Image (spheres, grey):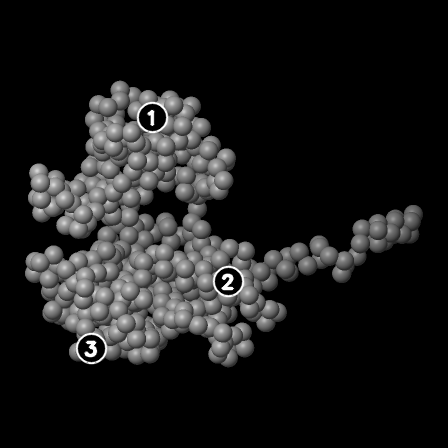
Amino acid sequence: MDLDFVQSGLLERFLDSDLISAAEVAALLKRRGVLDGTPVFLDKETQMPVPSLCEYGRYLSTSLLDESTLKDYGRAVGRVGGYLSELGSDVLSAAESDLVAYRNHRTLWQKKPIGGSAWGKESSVLDDLYGFLVDRGFLSYRPVRLAARGRNALAPRVRASMDIRHLTFEQFRYFRDVGLGGQSSDAQVDRGFRGWSPLRGRAGSDIALGSGMRWREWSTVLLPEIGLWPGTPGGAAEFTVQACAKYGKPRPIYVPEDAVESADLFCLLERPDMVRRAARGLERKARDLFVVSEVDAAGGRVRGVLGGVVREYQMSAMPAKLRRITVHEGEFGLEALSLFVCRGGLTPGADAWKSYRHRAWRRMIALADRTTPHLPARRWRWHDLRHTYALQLLTYLENLMDGTEPDPQARRRRHRSYLTGHIRHNPLLIVSRRLGHANPETTYQYLQYTDDLIDEFEAAFSSWVGDGESTYAEIASNALSSTKGSR
């Protein structure tokens, strides 16, 4: 079985048929609600669509999933289909033992086994797939029995908690200045650092840490949103994210002034050269871009031409895919409206930001010595800056609420204030709202990291471990001598 994905933008370029035009196919996909990224499953020999699985792809498309999620679901189904074909089976005829064997293959036997969290997502896709096949009549029953409370029997037995990893102040500065910024460990300019756009990496890390945004939110931020646009007041920036937010849940974003200044420095020193070099290439593919002619920074709206049609969007409602192709007429020609640009003139994608982070990590490891902060066994992720933001803000708000009053009863009374005050001023709820968590229970998991108990752990076992205190032989000798004395 082969897997492909719907890409309507490629129709005009590659569709060559006397029976139907590219415009007609594009209109049909739009009328049927088939989104870009919808998986299409083809028989390997005949290259004809597999009806049941293609019907599942259409079902996913109508569920209003974003393009990346549609592709992830499609790849999950494609993987299990490929494995089952090696067993002489397929998705419709698979038995429970076949799917259990596939689970063991993915989590135990393949060259690089996946963890419980990744398998949990994949098993939920399989559960959704077989539920759909039964509902639509392709199967009379699920091949896998349902566990208690309707739970997928293939799902991990232990629910994985959040993988919260945060950076200390020293670790963050080492990551930002040395790994991304091209400095040496002694804060001097490293002459061997070339071509990695250090100011772009520093600005990205400052915005990620200072705002607590997810990677997709801060990496696609637009110049008018962050206040680097003619007519904007400057200073700290406030705007709303929605389409780029998880589950499309809108929330206000605050970017502190220092982070905006870091982005402004990138715009002054590095960005113009990238924009100038890429302008000619963007002009050649202008028909595939959203060319903005009007920007209402105060109202948060943009107006321009996309696909030959004049369109107007609320900036918060622009998904990441649209933001990456949004351009405007600048000093050198067409340039991206987004803050961050790469060599091609548009917003760097996920693989590009991943490579920036990996190169920074290799550089930090190479330069590490006794003066550098402790580096964990696993390299840091961009999302770790969001965790650091949450923990730093939560700790600060808790300390602010505790105050400096010596009377513990006074502090306790303030914590037990009236309900509306509790909802408005509770540190945990404030952080939950800022992070955009759908459930405050997710934010609760940060509590275990707010107190650094290393000193307490040291004190608790200071006389237990090591050779600094009495050995058992000395203890036994003292006990024996005291016993003889008593006799």
Residue drawn at 80 percent across, 54 percent down: 471
96 relative position to 67: left or right: right
Asked if one can make out residue 253 in the rendered structure from this viewpoint, the answer is no
Tell me the amino acid under the disc marked 1. Answer: Asp
Q: Which residue is mark 1?
A: 90
User: Disc 2 or 3, which lies upstream in sequence?
Assistant: 3
Name the one closer to the observer, 487 or 209.
209
User: Disc 2 or 1, which lies upstream in sequence?
Assistant: 1
Q: Quadrant of residue 148?
A: top left
Across and down, in percent, residue 72 comes to 32, 43
**Quick check: 137 above or below 419?**
above
Q: Nearer the viewer, mark 2 or mark 3?
A: 3
Across and down, in percent, residue 280 comes to 22, 69
**Quick check: 301 above or below 129?**
below
Q: Real-space Cα distance between discs 3 and 1?
A: 57 Å
Name the one closer to the observer, 374 or 312.
312
Q: Badge 1: few (under 14), some or many (20 or more) residues near its Cα, within 10 Å?
A: some
| Element class at badge 1 | loop
Q: Real-space Cα distance between discs 2 and 1?
A: 43 Å
Residue drawn at 80 percent across, 51 percent down: 472
Tell me the amino acid under the disc marked 3. Answer: Glu
Mark sitting on residue 362? 2
Q: Which residue is mark 3?
A: 331
